[in-house]
């Protein structure tokens, strides 16, 4: 896929308007093209900021009544010139209000963007939730660690651990490449009953290892640790105790 084609379809990808095959093609391109991935992340961030910060107003009852009346008259077979004029007037008002609201939201986003810094948890949570959409969980679907681990070669800048934890009750599902913290990173996916566990990895900024540290947000749990010069993050809606058990098994196995 060419960058021009990918960028033209990014908004449709965010809106869920593409077929599964088209969405997968876009996702594969994003995994190997940092420029398109950055544009996709910017669109996603803008949408989130507008959704969180845009001011919303309830229409007054008088306006609702007038609009309903205008719509009802438009559906009538006898529409006068006066009614058509009124409808055009209300459409212009509605369009103006919509443009004003969207413009104010975009202005607010632009004004605040330099002051907003998303944390690793924000980006990982967005990535994790996005992965739960149909067709987004894995790029390589396999329960074999010797299939999943080599798949990352040449696609990411670290080689993540991919231990086999089937006997511990955490079966390997596969892996994918995702865009987090300004880079393409490997994600190894495990399961636990009906829960998914995404394990992200990127080069650590600090040498050595560190014990697991956990936090929670919006019903999802994170456990992060460092090992072998790599920083790992496990993200899931699995309860914290079981997620720590998973991390202990993961670190002991590699």
Image (cartoon, rainbow, N blue to C red):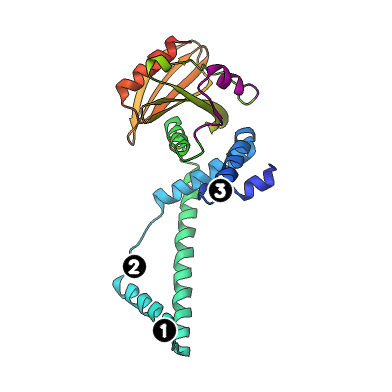
The answer to whether residue 100 is visible is: yes
Q: Residue at x 33, y 30 (%)?
A: 216
Which residue lies under the disc numbered 1?
76
Q: Which residues are magenta?
A: 137-154
Which residue lies under the disc numbered 2?
59
Q: Which mark is residue 107?
A: none
Which residue lies under the disc numbered 3?
19
Q: Earlier in the sequence, mark 1 or mark 2?
A: 2
Q: Earlier in the sequence, mark 3 or mark 1?
A: 3
Q: Residue at x 43, y 21 (%)?
A: 171
Q: Secondary structure at mark 3?
A: loop
Question: Quick one: label 3, few (<14), some, or many (20+) residues within 10 Å?
Answer: few
Nearer to the camera, 219 or 139: 139
- Spot occupied by residue 11 in the image (x, y as percentages of width and height): 55, 50
Between the residue at mark 1 and the residue at mark 2, the CA separation in whole angstroms equals 24 Å
Nearer to the camera, 88 or 145: 145
Give the number of callouts.
3
Q: Residue at x 63, y 26 (%)?
A: 155
Q: Nearer the viewer, mark 3 or mark 1?
A: 3
Q: Secondary structure at mark 2?
A: loop
| Screen quadrant of the N terminus | top right
Magenta includes 176?
A: no
The answer to whether residue 188 is visible is: no
Figure quadrant of residue 77: bottom left
In the rendered view, tell whether residue 249 sits above or below residue 218.
Answer: above
């Amino acid at each position: 896929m060419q960058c021009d084609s990918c960028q033209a379809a990014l908004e449709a990808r965010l809106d869920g308007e593409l077929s599964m095959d088209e969405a997968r093609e876009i996702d594969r391109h994003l995994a190997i093209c940092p420029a398109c991935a950055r544009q996709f992340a910017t669109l996603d961030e803008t949408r989130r900021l507008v959704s969180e910060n845009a001011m919303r107003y309830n229409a007054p009852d008088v306006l609702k009544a007038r609009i309903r009346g205008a719509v009802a008259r438009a559906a009538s077979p006898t529409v006068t010139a006066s009614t058509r004029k009124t409808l055009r007037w209300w459409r212009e008002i509605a369009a103006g209000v919509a443009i004003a609201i969207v413009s104010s939201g975009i202005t607010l986003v632009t004004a605040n963007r330099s002051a907003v810094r998303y944390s690793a948890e924000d980006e990982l949570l967005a990535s994790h939730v996005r992965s739960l959409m149909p067709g987004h969980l894995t790029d390589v679907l396999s329960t074999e660690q010797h299939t999943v681990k080599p798949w990352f070669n040449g696609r990411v800048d670290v080689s993540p651990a991919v231990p086999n934890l089937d006997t511990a009750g955490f079966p390997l599902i596969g892996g994918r490449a995702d865009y987090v913290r300004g880079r393409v990173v490997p994600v190894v996916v495990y399961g636990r009953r009906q829960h998914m566990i995404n394990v992200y990895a990127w080069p650590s900024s600090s040498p050595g290892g560190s014990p697991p540290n956990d936090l929670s947000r919006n019903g999802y749990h994170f456990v992060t640790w460092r090992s072998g010069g790599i920083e790992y993050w496990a993200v899931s809606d699995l309860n914290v105790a079981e997620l720590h058990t998973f991390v202990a098994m993961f670190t002991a196995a590699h």
